[in-house]
Image: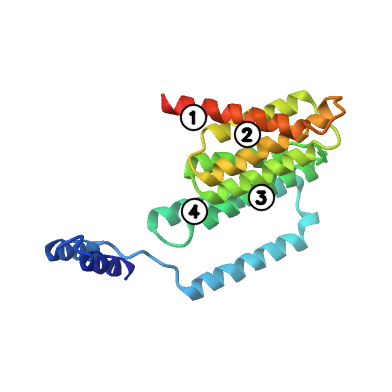
């Protein structure tokens, strides 16, 4: 066990005595072993899932519009429920199930847009995924949600091209700045900072300014924001 190796290393480094070693080992032996899904069961679940998705894809055009949306919502909540019980009962990979649930959330929105013929250009889809990824980060504080937040935030910025309004740009700035301000890890700070910096390039579309200095002004604004955050956090 890794725990036993670490305890032995601490003992060899004279950080703990033999009595402490015995008590730590006794404590670890009393802990319940993590539950793991049998390999054959996991393989069977994967093949069953593939069969279900193949059947749905083959009969997609025959499924009523409302049933399509309901089906995708059901799959989304199924994966979030599995993630919840996976974490509570210590089996499987809760993070993987939540990421799949987030993907099913995006698939649900895409199904709604396609079913009811909503335009995908400049749509709510990247915004919803961006906000959902950030919400996942603030609730579970895992780096994978920072990566997804950056990816979907970049998708929002790309959707601004070739036209962008002051309202959309301002809302994006507020969301990205709030993410930057409340970040606790380096990855989250870096990704939110990059989104804020990239949003400065959007000003070329918004403002009639014949110069290439927008990135420089964006850096000045970010340095000022960073100074305000450091001052606020120190008080």
Q: Does label 1 or label 4 sit earlier along the sequence? A: 4
Residue 28 visible within the image = yes
Give the foreground label among 2 and 3: 2
Kindly identify which numbered label has been placed on residue 83. 4
As rendered, which of 41 and 61 lies closer to the eye?
41
Q: Is residue 53 left or right of residue 88?
A: right
Disc 1: which residue: 230
As rendered, which of 112 and 234 lies closer to the eye?
234
Cα gap from disc 1 to disc 4, whole angstroms: 36 Å
Residue appearing at x 45%, y 68% in the figure: 37
Q: Position of residue 101 (x, y in %)?
A: 58, 51
Q: Are marks 1 and 3 in contact (CB under 8 Å)?
A: no
Residues packed near mark 3 inside 10 Å, few (<14), some (14 to 19) or many (20 plus): many
Residue appearing at x 78%, y 29% in the figure: 203
Give the foreground label among 4 and 2: 2
Disc 3: which residue: 72
As rendered, which of 100 and 211 lies closer to the eye?
211
Residues packed near mark 1 inside 10 Å, few (<14), some (14 to 19) or many (20 plus): few
Q: Quadrant of residue 44?
A: bottom right
Q: Is residue 165 left or right of residue 54?
A: right
Q: Quadrant of the C terminus?
A: top left
Cα gap from disc 2 to disc 3, whole angstroms: 29 Å
Disc 2: which residue: 176
Circle 3 — which element?
A: helix
Kindly identify which numbered label has been placed on residue 163. none
Circle 1 — which element?
A: helix
């Amino acid at each position: 066990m890794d725990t036993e190796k670490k305890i032995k290393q601490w003992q060899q480094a004279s950080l703990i005595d033999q009595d402490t070693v015995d008590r730590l080992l006794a404590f670890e032996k009393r802990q319940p072993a993590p539950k793991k899904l049998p390999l054959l069961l996991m393989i069977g679940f994967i093949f069953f899932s593939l069969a279900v998705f193949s059947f749905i894809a083959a009969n997609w055009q025959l499924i009523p519009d409302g049933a399509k949306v309901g089906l995708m919502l059901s799959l989304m909540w199924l994966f979030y429920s599995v993630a919840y019980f996976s974490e509570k009962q210590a089996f499987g990979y809760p993070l993987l199930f939540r990421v799949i649930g987030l993907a099913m959330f995006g698939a649900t929105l895409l199904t709604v847009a396609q079913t009811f013929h909503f335009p995908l250009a400049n749509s709510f889809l990247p915004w919803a995924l961006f906000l959902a990824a950030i919400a996942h980060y603030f609730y579970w504080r895992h780096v994978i949600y920072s990566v997804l937040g950056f990816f979907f935030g970049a998708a929002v910025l790309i959707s601004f091209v070739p036209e962008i309004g002051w309202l959309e740009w301002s809302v994006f700035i507020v969301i990205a700045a709030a993410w930057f301000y409340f970040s606790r890890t380096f990855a989250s700070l870096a990704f939110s900072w990059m989104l804020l910096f990239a949003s400065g390039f959007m000003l070329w579309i918004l403002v009639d300014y014949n110069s290439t200095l927008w990135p420089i002004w964006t850096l000045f604004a970010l340095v000022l924001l960073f100074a305000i955050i450091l001052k606020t956090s120190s008080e």
